[in-house]
Amino acid sequence: MNKLLITAILFLSISFSGFSQSKKALKKIETKATELVEKINKEITDSDASLALSDTQKEAIKKIHTERIIALRKLGKEASKEDKKELNKTYYSKIFKDVLNKKQMKARRKTKKAAKN
């Protein structure tokens, strides 16, 4: 009986520690996604502050970036550069075609072009 109880407690503690680690990983992913959202917003607002992302757009972009980062991790380190590039292209096209409007895209391109020069 004691062995069964000890085994059950050990199993539960291992399960909870694994869950805690996955929560930390998700929190890290969400933090990175938030940073990327702010980067896009800065690229837009550097050109025209009135075109800043709305809260709805920020949430949509954060969700897409979170999905993208998770998908990249699932691909693994052994995935080819082309596979990763294709995956990124798919998710970024969602952001640029489905979330941002034309004025925001134009402002972002203007900022990126100025940064290159």
Image (spheres, rainbow, N blue to C red):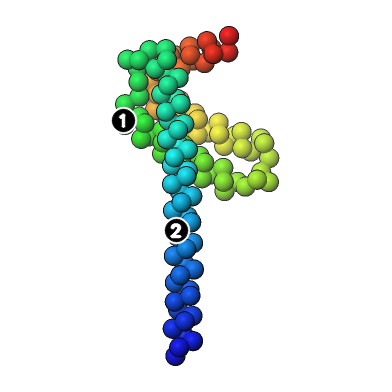
Please tell me in which quadrant of the rendered image residue 103 appears. top left
Residue 97 seen anywhere in this rendered image of the structure: no
Q: Is residue 71 above or below residue 5?
A: above
Q: Which mark is residue 20?
A: 2
Q: Position of residue 22 (x, y in %)?
A: 47, 55
Q: Which mark is residue 55?
A: 1
Q: Is residue 54 above or below residue 16?
A: above
The answer to whether 115 appears left or right of 60 in the picture is right
Q: Which mark is residue 73?
A: none
Image quarter hosting the C terminus: top right
Q: Is residue 36 above or below residue 25?
A: above
Q: Position of residue 35 (x, y in %)?
A: 45, 33
Q: Residues within 10 Å of mark 1 (few under 14, many from 20)?
A: few
| Residue at image location 44% in from the left, 72% down from the top | 12
The three-letter code of the residue at mark 1 reads Asp
The three-letter code of the residue at mark 2 reads Ser
